[in-house]
Image: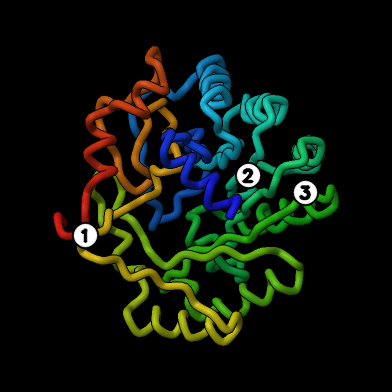
Amino acid sequence: MIIEKVGRKIRRKNIPFWLLWEITHKCNHECFFCYNHKQNREETSFDAALNILRKLKKMGTLFMLCTGGEPFLRKDFLDILEFSRKEGFDVCVYSNGSLINSKVAKRLAALYLNYVGITVHSLNKNVFDKITGVDGSFERTMAALRHLRENRVPVKIKCNFIKENFSEIPRIWEFAKENNYPFQYGMDLVCRGDGSNKFKSSMLSDQQRLNVMRFIYNKNKTFVYYIKKRNERVCNMMDKVMTINAYGDIIPCLDFKTRNTSIIGRDIEDVWNFSPELSKFKNILWKDM
């Protein structure tokens, strides 16, 4: 009952309860299925980042998830995390782990993050490195997991199920379970912002997806699948989640981009509440697709 009341208040007052922040587009991996693409734009400065956090605190934001690109490529990323924790945000981070050494893990431990999500594409070194396009990436990710565990930083294992690692899904699942890591998976791939569709050849077939669903059901004895009605909105994510990209634009989510929604030099609350582009997306129904 209390949760429902809070949810209604969040929707009524349009409070961005969650911040999903693509803190940088830069990445040191070259995963062929990734939606990310290079852009010739200046990323949000350190001072602008802190101003965003100050404003969102006043707006009522409580949770923050930082992703990329690879967040730790920002030299000021740990400073941004430290500021966010001092401001009272509950913080999660998505990373490929390649830059998390013992020193970084110690600093993360002192921040008491909700968790650090580490992407494990495969437990086979050759497959892992082929997916990332970087030799040695498997060893660096495994080392990051060890450093985080030694410093008692909560970890969640993440994995995109694609044809290249399909045969390993049970093994990756068991790896997470054996090490007491929560496991987050995905099967949907998204086209890059530059229009490239190279990812299509790696998408699971319908039969493979069905096999994954059966596997998960047999493990959890449950599988949640939402069937949308024609008069329902395509996405309700913006009811409580504000997504900001590396350049300071509010976007509907990481899968969709908009124009004229920059918050750099503008009032965040005004853009969030009154942007025609965001309002238009928020009210798209399935029957309009």
Q: Distance between the residues labelled 2 and 3?
A: 11 Å
Q: What residue type is labelled 1?
A: Asn
Q: Nearer the viewer, residue 179 or 201?
A: 179
Mark 3 or 1, which is nearer the eye?
A: 1
Q: In this view, does 138 lie above or below 87?
A: below
The answer to whether the residues at label 2 and label 1 have Cβ atoms under 8 Å apart is no
The colour scheme applied to this rendered structure is rainbow
Residue at x-position 71% and y-position 28%: 82
Residue under numbered circle 2? 92
Viewer-nearest of discs 2 and 3:
2
Mark 3 belongs to which amino acid? Val
Disc 2 and disc 1: Cα gap in Å? 34 Å
Pointer 2 or 3: first along the chain? 2
Image quarter of the N terminus: bottom right
On the picture, is 284 further left or further right than 237? left
If you read the primary sequence from the N terminus, does the residue marked by circle 3 or circle 1 appear first?
Answer: 3
Residue appearing at x 29%, y 26% in the figure: 274
User: In what element is the residue under mark 3?
Assistant: loop
Q: Which of marks 2 and 1 is nearer the N terminus?
A: 2
119 over 211 or under it: above or below = above
Where on the picture, by quarter, is residue 155?
bottom right
Rendered view: 235 above or below 222? above
Please give the label number shown on residue 231. 1
- Image position of 8 (left or right of 266): right
In the drawing, what numbered circle is on residue 246? none
**Residue 217 or residue 180, whichever sits in front:** 217
Residue under label 3, please give it. 153
User: Residue 117, position in %: x, y?
Assistant: 62, 52
Left/right of residue 48 with respect to residue 149 in the rendered view: left
Q: What element carries label 2?
A: strand
What residue is rendered at 44% in x and 37% in y?
242
Quarter containing the C terminus:
bottom left
